[in-house]
Amino acid sequence: MAISVLFDRRRSFWKWFSRHEDRLAGAAASDPIRFLGNVVRRLRRVHRSLVCELGPEADGKRQFVISADGNKTAFPVVVELASMAPPLRRWTIVKFRQRNQDLDEFTLRFGEIEIKPSDVEVHAEPVGEVIGLMLFIRGCTGSDDRYARAAFILLDQTLGEFDMETKVGPVEVLPFESHRDLRRLPLVKLPATFDTLAAGLRARADQA
């Protein structure tokens, strides 16, 4: 029964979205905050963790990103909901928050704290079946937990929601001046190194 109800809620969401496709596209352009609030309320009838974002527009179609908001248990719902999307003229459906391709332009602010990707270096290494990360942030002190919160937001932007939740293991946030003996790379260079490490872990798992 529960599966049937969930299926009906997904189908109802897309029926509503498709019926109002043009109006929603106009709302996204003119008042994106109101658009997101309206659509999130609808998404949460499907699952309480679902949220959405607006992505770039190309060839007259705007990206509509469905996210589990970091809740790994809701990942299957995101995948299944996206797979049920009907053909849409104005929208491209995207599963999970993607990597920020303009990371150099990204700035994160917590009160008086401002952090740019250029303020962060990373050490990455396999830890069992996942990848452990050490983030070194300029200005970071062990007593200010805002840097830890900032680190996870930055990693989400850098690696994307799916990889962040399924492939990343322990994360340490440390002062920039510490552990100078480790191999460190700028945050913007992390995706290529991360993908290489993840591919190595997959190959090792396949051979086991």
Image (cartoon, helix red, strand yellow):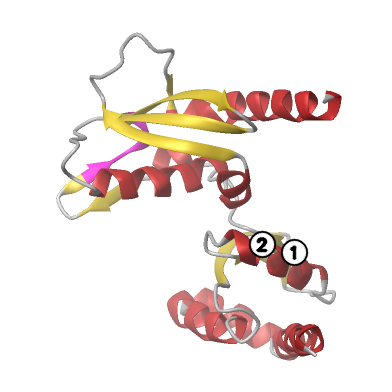
Quadrant of res 134 = top left
Dot label at residue 19? none
**x then y, percent, for residue 59:** 73, 60
- Image: magenta residue range: 114-118
Closer to us: 59 or 15: 15
Q: Identify the image quadrant of the N terminus.
A: bottom right
Q: Is residue 118 above or below residue 80?
A: above
* Residue 60 seen in the current view: no
Closer to us: 28 or 124: 124
Label total for image: 2
Quadrant of res 96 = bottom right
Magenta stretch: includes residue 37: no
Q: Which residue is mark 1?
A: 79
* Secondary structure of residue under mark 1: helix
In the shown orientation, is residue 117 left or right of residue 71?
A: left
Residues tagged 2 and 1 counted as in contact (Cβ below 8 A): yes
Closer to us: 144 or 28: 144
Closer to us: 179 or 62: 179
**x then y, percent, for residue 130:** 60, 34
Magenta stretch: includes residue 115: yes
Question: How much space separates mark 2 and mark 1, taking CA atoms?
Answer: 6 Å
Badge 2 amino acid: Phe
Crowdedness near tag 1: few (<14), some (14–19) or many (≥20) residues, C-alpha within 10 Å: some
In the shown orientation, is residue 61 left or right of residue 116?
A: right
Badge 1 amino acid: Val
Q: Which residue is mark 2?
A: 75
